[in-house]
Image: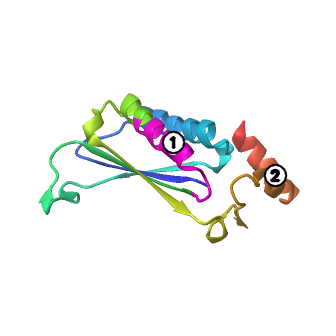
Amino acid sequence: MPTYTVKYSNFTLTKQKKNKIAKGITSVHEKVTGAKSFFAQVIFVENKKNYHFMGGKSVKKKQLFLNGQIRAGRSEEIKDKLIKKLRDTLIQNSGLSRDKIWVYIVDLPPAQMIEYGEILPRSGEEESWFNNLPKKLKKKLIELDN
């Protein structure tokens, strides 16, 4: 359900840091929203030198940008908690200072999202959606969640 894209400029994230960031993002999303961990995917993209601009000028300092696409339907309170906890896990696991971190959350209507080949449920209807999946897919998702 959530797809988090981590784009970063002017530094390298080691495999270990990527693992920590991915686990941190997944954990935050699961704890704050209640969605199972198998829905969260994290994609890393390293910006090439001179491919990131602000104010029309090439960015020269370290920057980390997280764009999270999540299902619409959550309260403002949950989204506020989510965005702040995502920021905090990025600071903790990247080693960057707060002013180098950007986090955007974008709501998408569940009916406009397909994951694992299935249209996604509305927020709060995950259990019913899961129970109606083909047995083979349910088994796969249970294995991913453990």
Q: Horizontally, is 26 left or right of 85 in the view?
A: right
Q: Nearer the viewer, residue 88 or 9?
A: 88
Q: Residue at x 17, y 43 (%)?
A: 61
What residue would you read off at disc 1?
82
The quarter of the image holding the N terminus is bottom right
Report the residue marked by disc 2.
138
Report the side of 125 relative to 37 (left or right): right
Q: The residue under label 2 is which amino acid type?
A: Lys
Which residue is pictured at 14% across the width and 56% down the height?
A: 58
Mark on residue 15?
none
In three-dimensional space, the C-alpha distance between marks 2 and 1, rounded to whole angstroms, equals 27 Å
Q: Residue furthest bottom?
A: 112
Give the secondary structure at mark 1.
helix
Q: What percent of the width, then of the height, locates residue 53?
A: 19, 59
Coordinates of residue 142 in the picture (x, y in percent): 77, 43
- Residue in view at x 60 percent, y 52 percent: 74
